[in-house]
Amino acid sequence: MGPTGTSRRQRVPREVRKAQMLDVAEQVFAERGFAAASMDDIAERVGLSKPMLYEYFGSKEGLLVGCINRARTELRQVTEHAVAEADGAEDALRRAVRAFFDYIEHRRVSWCMLRHESAVTVPWAVDEIEGIRRQQTELFAMLTAGYLPGAGPMDLEAAAEVVVGACERVALWAERRGDVSAATATEYVMRFVWSGLVSVAAR
């Protein structure tokens, strides 16, 4: 006999449920830091049992890795999408840098979690976050190489490291000021990086 007076609770697809868990976990990690965050609190906010969290992620550490990996995937996707129709090297770099600032502006919780890496006491988590930097460095070097064949591999690698480091520091500076838009942050990075990259490629 079917239920009367109430509707049967719909089963939430696994990927949707997983995304909900990651959303809440990001918020808690950003608010409290990894060490102080509790699986009980995360489970309560999601509206699930703690065993369900463990079923999906295995541990609090696994949940943090899930958050970091999602941020890495999203950042790569938005960067690749941004440069897909670039018109030349300068435009490609500007689009990639702007994608980073747009991402952290719209995913403020993710950015807050990642920038608090110093509060993460487990070395492998720091390594996971460093993996995001390496991913972005490789992307910047690859897209620039396609437009500036005159630059050597080491030059492109070094330039990409400079761009990634500059983006992080400018993002922190913009956050402290509170009045710097993604567009303005992008122009500052381009102003101080692009001319140097072009001079290297022209040697």
Image (tube, grey):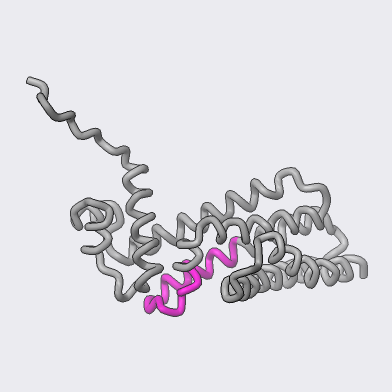
Out of 100 and 125, give the one closest to the viewer: 100
Tell me which corner region of the image, top left, top right, bottom left or bottom right, holds residue 42: bottom left
On whether residue 96 falls in the magenta region, the answer is no
| Residue furthest top in the image | 1
Image spot of residue 193 (x, y percent): 78, 70
| Residue furthest front in the image | 179
- Chief SS of the magenta region: helix
Q: Quadrant of the N terminus?
A: top left
Disc count in the image?
0
Out of 185 and 88, give the one closest to the viewer: 185
Q: Quadrant of the C terminus?
A: bottom right
Image spot of residue 179 (x, y percent): 63, 69
Determine whether, in the image, residue 200 is placed left or right of residue 52. right
Decide: is 84 above or below 99: above
Q: Residue at x 71, y 45 (%)?
A: 84
Tell me which corner region of the image, top left, top right, bottom left or bottom right, holds residue 12: top left
On whether residue 123 falls in the magenta region, the answer is yes
Determine whether, in the image, residue 97 is placed left or right of residue 44. right
Tell me which corner region of the image, top left, top right, bottom left or bottom right, holds residue 99: bottom right
Q: Residue at x 85, y 58 (%)?
A: 149
Image spot of residue 148 (x, y percent): 84, 58
Q: Residue at x 70, y 73 (%)?
A: 162
Q: Which residues are magenta?
A: 114-135
Decide: is 81 above or below 29: above
Out of 163 and 7, give the one closest to the viewer: 7
Determine whether, in the image, residue 144 is placed left or right of residue 111. right
| Residue furthest right in the image | 203
Decide: is 158 above or below 12: below
Q: Residue at x 37, y 67 (%)?
A: 29
